[in-house]
Amino acid sequence: MIGKSARRQGRAFLTPTVILLLCFTIFPLLFTLALVFGEAKFDEGGLRIGLVGLRNWTRLVHDARFWNAFSVTIRIVVAAVTLEYLLGLGLALLLDRKIRGRGIFRILFLIPMMLTPIAVGYMWRMIFDVGRGPITGILQRLGLPAVGWLTETRLAIYSIIITDVWQWTPFMFLILFAGLQAIPRDYVEAAKVDGASAWQLFRRVTFPLLAPASIAAVLLRGMEGFKIVDTIYIMTGGGPGRSTESLTLFGYSIGFRAFDLAYGATIAFSLFLAVMVGAIVFVTLSRRFRYVRLE
Amino acid sequence: MRTRRGTVFVYFALLVWTLVVVAPLFWMVTTSFKEKIDVFLGPKFLPGVDFTPTSRWWTRIFTVERDTLLRPYANSLITAGTSSFLATVLGALAAYALTRFRFKFGPMKNEDILFWIVSQRIMPPIIVVFAIFLMFRVTRLLDTHAGLILVYIVFNLPLAVWIMSNFLSQIPPSVEEAAMVDGASPATTFFRVVVPMILPSLTATFLLCFVFAWNEFLFALILTYTRAQTMPLLIAAQHFQRGPQWWDISALSTLAVLPPIVITVALQKYFVKGLIPIGK
């Protein structure tokens, strides 16, 4: 049916995309893979790369700053994604009915995830400000002491998590809401006819049927969450101390501030590995979870 | 009257979350209309009640400081606009090829190629940026529009291909087949027959890509310095250079979030229909 020249044109349609991706993601990935086993030096002859074997990796394993960044990133991802899922699910369930103003609520709830993270980070930096911020103002009017949201080592990470939850709950809401809309009404009606309570309906019907959307939402958000850098960069710069330094921020400051490209690449690669391992573990666990649910 | 109480609870919960969404934005926008003293003398909340709004900072941005402050916005517009346009076109072409022709590259069939393209999105930018930085250093693309545009095309391509292939797979190929039978080449068919049909989806994809490029920070931070500096970098730089000049930076941040808000409202129809179809 389709002629040879047509097929050639079809291939030509695909070619630019494939070439661009090869040049700007696959080649750079391989280059980074080479860097993690080497060292990069700038001198008069330009850039020189020499192989050093596993030295970067031994350094990484013994680097307390790496393990700190690793733990900060994991803590932010786990806490933020959990809260975002619960809130997003709650909002989706609330709007999954015929009520007035539904369209307006829906738009409003989506807006934060589309906003520039740097602007969002700055906005929350002002809000958390201990001297002039609105939270301090409200606390003072209630006769409570001011809290150094961004200046206390213990609290700063929570401020980052709150900001992330504000910005990304909409993403969970978006996917879970679409998932709810896709559930056939018959199932819900049938369960209601059988006299299921609201809680039973949710536990036995809605939630299991929502499982694919839930898994996709948590997986996509989780993988994005590992890359967190913009809001931290502007809110705390990784501080106080290094209490909010994420892996991307750590990799950036080693690679492009200290200009140790090889070690920076090693940190970046460990982030990539963490994302992959995290995704595989999550998908495996969620498969088992779904199997049990639908038994 | 269980349902009545239920409705009240639903509205109450919805209004609480509305407040959570709106209050921070309200704070940012009003701060851009505050005098310095209203910022420094503790928090003021309501314009006209506990402070008198001023448009001084906004005027300054558009007059005295126009050249320094608005140039990064122009850079953002140029890079985000151009890259999103090209990503949409290339993404639509690739999606069209993948939904209409059968490919086989070694063990990879159409679904595998699509998955390979889309999965590129997972890659953390910090991994690829080392090589791109060195490539750009050699080819003198650092701190240029062209360089950032290239990176943003690639950054948005997986998304564009994914969305467009979802849209295209919903279109029955009968119309195109008629054109093909009449002897039109795939290129002619695509641009004359398919593009007019999918123009709204193309626009939606373009706008979504635009927002992602407009918001992007890490690539811009590493690959640009001054000439091609984009808007998020300006905001960060203002913040670190000038300290707590909330009024200015609030105005700049408000200016940054306006396009995404407008685009979200424009795209609401697509969001609701499920721009991102999950587990079809």
Image (cartoon, rainbow, N blue to C red):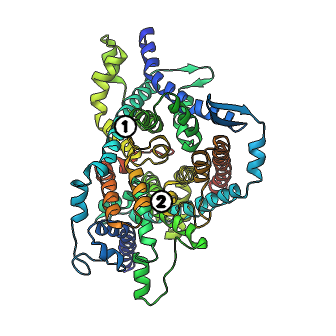
User: Who is closer to the viewer here, B2 or B128?
Assistant: B128
Where's residue B127, x and y in %? 59, 41
The answer to whether residue B178 is visible is no
Residue occupied by mark 2? A234
The answer to whether residue A212 is visible is yes
Q: Choose top left, top right, bottom left or bottom right for residue A185.
A: bottom left
Where's residue A32, x and y in %? 64, 36
Where's residue A84, x and y in %? 51, 62
* Labelled pair 1, 2 in contact (Cβ < 8 Å): no
- The crowd level at tag 2 (other Cα within 10 Å; few <14, some 14-19, many 20+) is many
Amino acid type, residue under disc 2 in the picture: Ile
Give the numbered dot on residue B84: 1
Instruction: Tell me if A127 is positioned left or right of A70 in this view.
Output: left
The residue furthest front is A44
User: Who is closer to the viewer here, A111 or B132?
Assistant: B132
Numbered disc 2: what chain?
A: A
Q: Residue at (46%, 53%) from the top-left corner?
A: A175
Q: Is residue A226 above or below residue A140?
A: above
Badge 2 element: helix
